Amino acid sequence: MSGLVLKLKPFEELLVNGVLLENGERNTRLRVKTEGAHILRLRDALQPEEATTPVKRAYYIAQLAVSGQIATAEAAAILDKALAENPDFGAGPDLHACVAAHDFYKLMRRLRPLAMPERSERGAGGDGRPQAMAAAG
């Protein structure tokens, strides 16, 4: 079975297609089987006022695409420009591939250590990826 696997802690909140959901009292594991669902765990989200650096702004644009708040083509155009203007983001070619494929989850995973280093260390699973965005294989 494939799909996005969400591991939620008690009372953790997430957006699914623009609807705010909250987990109950226990840890939960969900598998999202629908392609194209817009899902964002709120602890992985930046607030607009936090997007103060080029890498944070790129992360925020990817987040908007993941949550369905802007069209993927619009997000890709903005991110292509941001990556061209800021080649120091690190894994440059990999980031361009994520944008070209409209894989904004993967882009957020790649940018997260740069955009939110304090949250990356705390919220990562054993493989270093944020648990909300670990895709089942």
Image: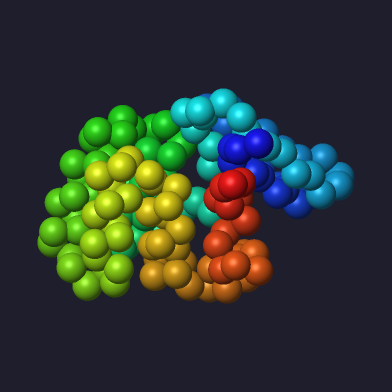
Q: Position of residue 10 (x, y in %)?
A: 79, 49
Task: From the viewer's side, name the closer residue of 56 and 27.
Answer: 27
| Furthest residue in direction right, as rendered | 25
- Looking at the image, residue 86 lies above or below residue 27: below
Q: Is residue 64 visible?
A: no
* Residue appearing at x 64%, y 64% in the figure: 125
Color scheme of the displayed model:
rainbow
* Residue appearing at x 65%, y 36% in the figure: 1
Indicate left or right for 31 with 97 as reference: right
- Looking at the image, residue 113 lies above or below residue 5: below
**Residue 20, located in which quarter of the rendered image?**
top right
**Residue 65, located in which quarter of the rendered image?**
top left
* Residue appearing at x 71%, y 39% in the figure: 30
Q: Position of residue 107 (x, y in %)?
A: 38, 54
- Looking at the image, residue 37 lies above or below residue 24: above
Q: Position of residue 70 (x, y in %)?
A: 33, 33
Q: Position of residue 88 (x, y in %)?
A: 22, 72
Indicate left or right for 34 with 79 as reference: right
How many circles with numbers are drawn on the protein?
Answer: 0
**Residue 128, located in which quarter of the rendered image?**
bottom right
Q: Is residue 6 visible?
A: yes
* Residue appearing at x 25%, y 44% in the figure: 100
